Image (cartoon, helix red, strand yellow):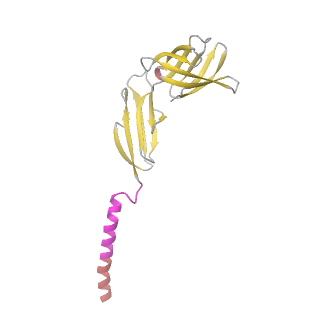
Amino acid sequence: MKSEKRSLPALSRAALCAFVLILPLVSCGFFGPPDYELSVAIEPGVQGTPAVGEYVYPELEEVAYKYTPLNAKHTVVVLLDGSGSAAEGTLTIYKSITLVARLFDVRGTWKVTYYVTDTTAGTTFDITFSGADLLAGSFSDSNGKHGTWDAASGTLKFNFSDWESYKFTGTLTSMSGTWTNGTKTGTWSSSKVE
């Protein structure tokens, strides 16, 4: 009986010590999934959610986002850690992430590769789009050819004024599409020249 009385205080002290040692670990999330930060920036001309700010989420949390342009003729692109993504989607948090929602700006130099239908050999040239705003302007290419471009409502069209009757049309955010030149047709794709 005496040994039972001694073991009760010993058990109480052991439980108290375990509680004191484990409590800080539980409060800092040691036993749960780690937390990561989502940093959101929204550039002028764009609206949506999540709003600008810093957010903390547990690992594997799914976060929905959606951004739209204030001017419906503009196109929004979302950069997740610098890589382009759709303006609406869901991201899974598995590390700290920076999200930037901004208007897509085609102006600059792009490397274009185009293919004639039913051929596998592509032809490549550089094209430089310029203009006073995001929606239209002029261009020149590495072959000395020129023309005009229009980038309204997610569609890019650029037409050469001095290269037969080449007309390129495509999706702005993917920078790819189709082209025509009279009866000749084909596809094209491009990548930004940094």
Q: Is residue 43 magenta?
A: no
Measured from the top left, where is residue 138 in percent x and y? 49, 15
Expressed as whole percent of the image width and height from the top left, the position of residue 48 reads 37, 32
Stretch in magenta: 12-33
- 83 relative position to 17: left or right: right
Residue 193, compared with residue 40, is above or below; it is: above
Percent x, y of residue 154: 48, 24
The residue lying at 37 percent from left, 57 percent from top is 29
Q: Is residue 74 visible?
A: yes
Please tell me whether residue 160 is drawn above or below residue 36 in the rendered image: above
Q: Residue at x 41, y 22 (%)?
A: 72
Verify whether residue 31 appears in magenta: yes
Taking depth in this image into account, of 124 and 50 the one nearest to the observer is 124
Q: Is residue 168 above or below residue 120?
A: above
Which of the two residues, 133 or 157, is positioned nearer the viewer here?
A: 133
Q: Is residue 78 above or below residue 37?
A: above
Residue occupying the point 50% across, 28% down: 173
Q: Is residue 49 visible?
A: no
The spot of residue 85 in percent (x, y) is 48, 34
Q: Mostly what secondary structure, the magenta segment?
A: helix
